[in-house]
Amino acid sequence: MGARSLYLHETVDIVGQGQYDYMSSVTREPTNVMPDMLTLQGTFFVCAVGGGRWPQVVNIWDVGPAGWRGWAANVDRLNLKRRSAFYGDWWDEAAQWRTGGFDRLCGGVQGSPTTPELAERGVRGTLFVHQLLAVRPGAVLDHLAAVAEVQVPLWRQYGHEPTGIYEVLGNQHEAVVVWATSIGEHTRLRGARDAARGLSDEAEPDDRLVDWERRAAGTVVGGDTHLMTPMPGTVYGPDSWEEASLDDWMP
């Protein structure tokens, strides 16, 4: 089976409007060029109209191909060695834009693409759906197997490609699922779901979306779904920010 794919999932509290500067600094984090250290897969800020705490950034780091041996190397540099060797200019720069955060060590499950697979397939998104789910204790792997079997092929029909299907390894009750999509495709999915529930006539109803939610309710006991804006130039981010002016909205 090979080494397990491991990821560090960070939620970072941001100072003011510092999300752009902070995400830019994350792309220059020194470990990105250190052998066998964490490399950035994606960095995002939470889109306010999509719900969620703000200002907040979510980072996803790939621990690397060495699995638990790679994890050990990363913990080692941040344990007793950090005071001597891993404080420096980058940490001082990043500290301008963040006040704290919360880390989750995650493990990929069957059906979760690796970072090289995402790059090879050319997966891209201009909007990301971030599902942080509370699952009945002990049922995380069962739920994620259902995600891979049922939700992935269904949501793909609405232009949503999974970039991470993760078990949170610090507890027995959390899962993370991240999807690359676009505003248009996510609007189409939301419209079809509402129509299937009799709440809107803006789209053709798709009862399968509601059926999936009913099935997931057998294992999911809470959590949140947020929308995220990706930093351009990451593994699955767009090439650049989109050009815009206030004239686009003002009469």
Image: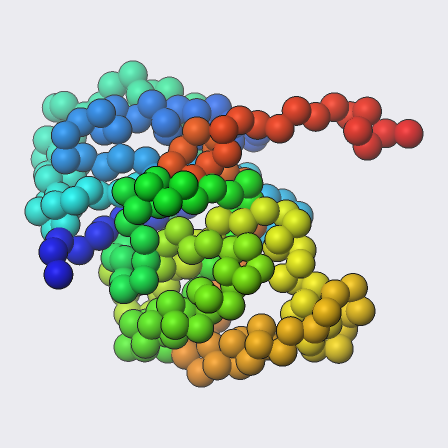
In the depicted view, which residue is nearer to us: 91 or 204?
Answer: 204
Up the image or down, 110 lies above or below 60; here it is below
Q: Is residue 8 visible?
A: no
Question: Which residue does the image show at 65% across and 69% down from the upper left?
Answer: 193
> Is residue 67 rendered to the left or right of residue 100?
left
**Quadrant in which the C terminus appears:** top right
Residue 241 placement (x, y as % from top left): 57, 27
In the depicted view, which residue is nearer to us: 245 or 123?
Answer: 123
Question: Which residue does the image show at 57% across and 76% down from the upper left?
Answer: 208
> Is residue 86 rendered to the left or right of residue 108?
left
> Is residue 79 rendered to the left or right of residue 241?
left
Question: Which residue does the image show at 22% across and 43% down from the upper left?
Answer: 63
Q: Is residue 19 visible?
A: yes
Residue 188 placement (x, y as % from top left): 67, 58
Residue 5 placement (x, y as % from top left): 22, 52
In the depicted view, which residue is nearer to us: 178 or 161?
Answer: 161
Residue 159 placement (x, y as % from top left): 55, 55
In the depicted view, which residue is nearer to us: 188 or 168?
Answer: 188
Question: Which residue does the image show at 38% across and 37% down from the upper left?
Answer: 235
Up the image or down, 197 lies above or below 112; here it is below
* Quadrant of the rendered image containing residue 76: top left
The structure's colour scheme is: rainbow
**Quadrant in which the N terminus appears:** bottom left
* Quadrant of the rendered image containing residue 244: top right
Query: Looking at this rendering, what residue extends furthest in the right direction?
Result: 251
